[in-house]
Amino acid sequence: MGVFVDSNDMQEAICSWLRVSLNSISI
């Protein structure tokens, strides 16, 4: 793994993490 992460990868990771967290909270 590189030290720096592409902005696109970071956005996808954050979006997916937010979806999982929101789903777990809503349930």
Image: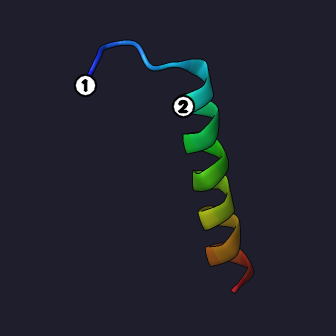
Q: Relative to 15, does residue 2 appear above or below in the rendering?
A: above
Q: Which amino acid type is shown beneath numbered disc 1?
A: Met
Residue 21 horizontal side relative to residue 2, left or right: right
- 2 or 1: tag closer to the N-terminus: 1
**Element on which disc 1 rests:** loop
Q: Residue furthest top?
A: 4
Q: Which residue is mark 1?
A: 1
Image point (40%, 13%), residue name: 4
Q: Which residue is mark 2?
A: 9
Image point (51%, 19%), residue name: 6
Q: Relative to 24, does residue 9 appear above or below in the rendering?
A: above
Expressed as whole percent of the image width and height from the top left, the position of residue 10 reads 55, 30
Q: Relative to 25, does residue 3 appear above or below in the rendering?
A: above
Q: Residue furthest left?
A: 1
The quadrant the C terminus occupies is bottom right
In the figure, residue 26 lies in which quadrant? bottom right
| Mark 1 closeness class: few <14, some 14–19, many ≥20 residues within 10 Å | few
Expressed as whole percent of the image width and height from the top left, the position of residue 14 reads 61, 42
**Element on which disc 2 rests:** helix
Image point (57%, 53%), residue name: 17
Numbered marks: total: 2
Expressed as whole percent of the image width and height from the top left, the position of residue 5 reads 44, 20
| Mark 2 closeness class: few <14, some 14–19, many ≥20 residues within 10 Å | few
Q: How is the image coloured?
A: rainbow
Q: Residue furthest bottom?
A: 27
Q: Which amino acid type is shown beneath numbered disc 2?
A: Asp
Image point (60%, 20%), residue name: 7
